[in-house]
Image (spheres, grey):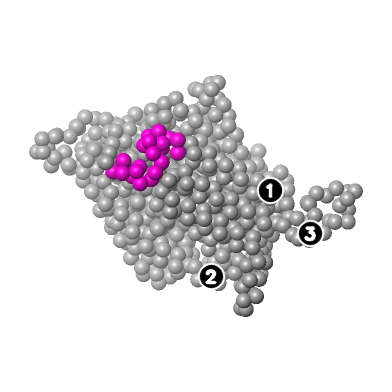
């Protein structure tokens, strides 16, 4: 592949690159960070990356909103000229899922802080080893 | 009403969970009966569907009368009717056996435990009946989130174990979601039957390959296949006993079922086993999983942690058996989903009973356990024999099919791993039997004669446990019928 080909690969498919980078940031945060809240933030970035991926695959250049109002949209019923609404709707559910996960995770974090007095994983493991 | 069973089996526990959460304020005493009735109704519906499938073949249910692929379809066939019946039975028996423990462990929060329990069951049943790839993700998260909350309700280090479970579980579910997204990108559909029709035209497509591998990785994480098992031992050993004996039989087995569903009915069989060189690495992964988990089980000093590692080895059995790619191995894997759910329930119920009565389940506390709790230990013996694979318990028969399949496929490493793991299980369980049976006499000269007072659990706990233990034998004796009537029809004809 030529240099222009590589540049094209990055520029034309920038939405995929954004989601891949965000996903790696999220995974890195969950694996490398030792603070539990930072891990939770990493988890949320990971989930958001996938939500962005879904939303980005629905868009089309110059397409109309997926609202079929008869007085304006009668001539635009060709699916190729309308943004695909399905991924957006799916992601509404995924957002709810990620909020619920976040809620449970934060509630557990409060319990962990009450019990150990810290949210640093290393310190918690020291406490557990000495107990 | 029986026409609506596929929807009712998910909707009724879901609604009952909401009602229980409200009843907890108004009429706390009504929560347990409502939960039991709902789960019994689910079991009845599941058995009814299994009967209908065996008599008249698979059928579909279109939610809201929207035809697929626009609407969500619940697809009932031999495979999921069997798994569904097993899981519904496990959920009901476990609640009957452990509500006393739950009342003691959770005190005033017990009604929220029932609500989460029902929510967990609703999600599990939904995962099993759904015919829609995205719907499966949503139900998977309903199960997982209520599972995290259930684990987090335990004492001591449960919150930390649950948080780690959340991290691993979320990565797993996100990977599955990403795989579904890739499939949607190239096919434009989420309905499993529709996907199976469109995918054969896309064999060379790299996105489809990526979707398969990403979704499978996510599922492996969720089912705790070594080396992605990190969350399981802590989550299972820190949670309180009613929770442990619910999620241990249901979670990993349901995820193995999803793997079977995805690899056989979403991706075409000749793609999963032919075009993609995935089967051989998956069998090796299973071999590693079985050997590593068995070795780690050897070094544990408490019963629940030991069983948690045995469970990880069992996941290896099912994954390996399935990816052998022949009829016999696959029969063994599907049979083992049912058998392992029953065995795990049986073993963890016994552990829960031991922990309630002896306040501890370390090997030291088990000295003289046969004399103190004869019925519970008898149940543990049956579960142990089944995990080792002694006829006529059901564990023997699924292992028989697995080994037969491995021999037919020429996968000698998998044969070796199965035999190795059975031997390790024999060592593990006979060590416990020895401690429970002989130790008091050996230990009496150390100055601390163990307490040998009779401490058996009440009859309401023992009865469901005995039913489960008998169930292991009955399942074993019924193996022939289950295989010929149900599992044979569940495996596509393309698999020889």
Q: Residue at x 45, y 35 (%)?
A: A110
Location of mark 3 (residue): A62
Q: Position of residue B53 (x, y in %)?
A: 59, 50
Provide the secondary structure element on which disc 1 rests. helix
The N terminus of chain B: image quadrant: top right
Q: Tell me: residue B262, above or below residue B115.
A: below
Tell me if mark 2 has few (under 14), some (14-19) or many (20+) residues whose alpha carbon lies within 10 angstroms of its own. Answer: some
| Image quarter of residue A18 | bottom right
- In magenta segment, residue B458: no
* Numbered disc in front, either 3 or 2: 3
- Classify 10 Å Cα crowding around label 1: few (below 14), some (14-19), many (20 and above): few
> Where is residue B426 drawn, in percent x and y?
27, 53
Q: Nearer the viewer, residue A5 or B275?
A: A5
Q: Are marks 1 and 3 in contact (CB under 8 Å)?
A: no
Q: Are marks 2 and 1 on the same chain?
A: no
B417 to the left or right of B49: left
Residue extending furthest left? B445
Disc 3: CA contacts within 10 A as few (<14), some (14-19) or many (>=20): few
> CA separation, marks 2 and 1?
32 Å
Which element is circle 2 on? loop
Mark whose residue sits in front, 1 or 3:
3
Q: Residue at 49% of width from left, 59% of height from top?
A: B217
* A125 is within the stretch colored magenta: yes
Mark drawn on residue A89? 1
Residue in view at x 67 percent, y 66 percent: A12
Does residue B208 appear to the left or right of B103 in the view shown? right
In magenta, the rendered stretch is A108-129
């Amino acid at each position: 592949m030529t240099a222009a080909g590589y540049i094209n690969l990055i520029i034309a498919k920038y939405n995929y690159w954004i989601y891949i980078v965000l996903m790696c940031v999220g995974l890195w945060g969950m694996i490398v960070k030792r603070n539990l809240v930072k891990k939770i933030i990493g988890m949320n970035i990971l989930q958001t990356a996938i939500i962005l991926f879904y939303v980005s695959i629905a868009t089309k250049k110059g397409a109309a909103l997926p609202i079929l109002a008869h007085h304006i949209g009668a001539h635009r019923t060709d699916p190729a000229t309308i943004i695909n609404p399905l991924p957006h709707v799916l992601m509404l559910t995924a957002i709810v899922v990620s909020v619920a996960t976040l809620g449970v995770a934060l509630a557990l974090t409060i319990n962990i802080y009450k019990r150990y007095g810290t949210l640093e994983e290393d310190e918690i493991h020291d406490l557990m080893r000495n107990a | 009403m029986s026409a609506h069973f596929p929807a009712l089996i998910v909707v009724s526990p879901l609604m009952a969970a909401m009602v229980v959460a409200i009843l907890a304020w108004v009429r706390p005493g009504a929560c347990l009966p409502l939960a039991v009735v709902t789960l019994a109704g689910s079991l009845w519906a599941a058995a009814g569907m299994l009967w209908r499938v065996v008599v008249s073949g698979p059928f579909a249910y279109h939610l809201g009368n929207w035809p697929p692929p626009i609407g969500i379809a619940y697809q009932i066939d031999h495979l999921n009717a069997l798994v569904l019946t097993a899981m519904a039975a496990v959920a009901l028996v476990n609640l009957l056996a452990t509500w006393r423990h739950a009342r003691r462990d959770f005190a005033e929060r017990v009604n929220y435990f029932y609500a989460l329990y029902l929510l967990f069951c609703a999600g599990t049943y939904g995962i099993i009946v759904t015919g829609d790839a995205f719907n499966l993700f949503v139900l998977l998260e309903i199960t997982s989130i209520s599972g995290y909350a259930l684990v987090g309700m335990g004492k001591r280090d449960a919150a930390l174990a649950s948080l780690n479970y959340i991290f691993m579980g979320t990565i797993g579910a996100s990977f599955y979601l990403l795989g579904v997204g890739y499939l949607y990108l190239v096919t434009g559909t989420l309905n499993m039957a529709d996907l199976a029709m469109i995918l054969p035209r896309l064999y060379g497509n790299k996105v489809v390959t990526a979707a398969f591998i990403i979704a499978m990785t996510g599922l492996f994480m969720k089912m705790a296949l070594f080396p992605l098992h990190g969350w399981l031992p802590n989550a299972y050993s820190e949670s309180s006993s009613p929770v442990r004996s619910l999620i241990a039989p249901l979670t990993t087995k349901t995820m193995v079922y999803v793997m079977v569903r995805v690899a056989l009915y979403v991706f075409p069989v000749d793609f999963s086993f032919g075009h993609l060189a995935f089967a051989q690495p998956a069998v090796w992964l299973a071999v590693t999983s079985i050997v590593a988990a068995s070795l780690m089980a050897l070094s544990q000093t408490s019963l629940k942690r030991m069983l948690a590692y045995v469970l990880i080895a069992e996941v290896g059995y099912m994954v390996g058996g399935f990816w052998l790619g022949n009829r016999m191995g696959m029969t063994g894997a599907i049979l083992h989903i049912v058998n392992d759910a029953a065995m795990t329930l049986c073993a963890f119920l016994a552990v829960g009973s031991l922990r309630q009565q002896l306040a501890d389940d370390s090997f030291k506390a088990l000295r003289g356990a046969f004399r103190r709790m004869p019925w519970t230990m008898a149940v543990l013996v049956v579960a142990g024999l089944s995990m080792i694979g002694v006829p006529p318990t059901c564990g023997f028969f699924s292992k028989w099919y697995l080994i037969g399949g491995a021999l037919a496929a020429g996968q000698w490493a998998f044969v070796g791993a199965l035999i190795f793991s059975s031997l390790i299980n024999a060592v593990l369980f006979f060590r416990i039997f020895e401690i429970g049976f002989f130790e008091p006499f050996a230990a009496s000269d150390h100055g601390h004669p163990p307490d040998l007072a009779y401490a058996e659990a009440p009859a309401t706990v023992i009865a469901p446990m005995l039913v489960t233990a008998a169930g292991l034998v009955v399942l074993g004796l019924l193996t022939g019928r289950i295989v010929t009537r149900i599992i044979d029809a569940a495996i596509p004809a393309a698999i020889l």
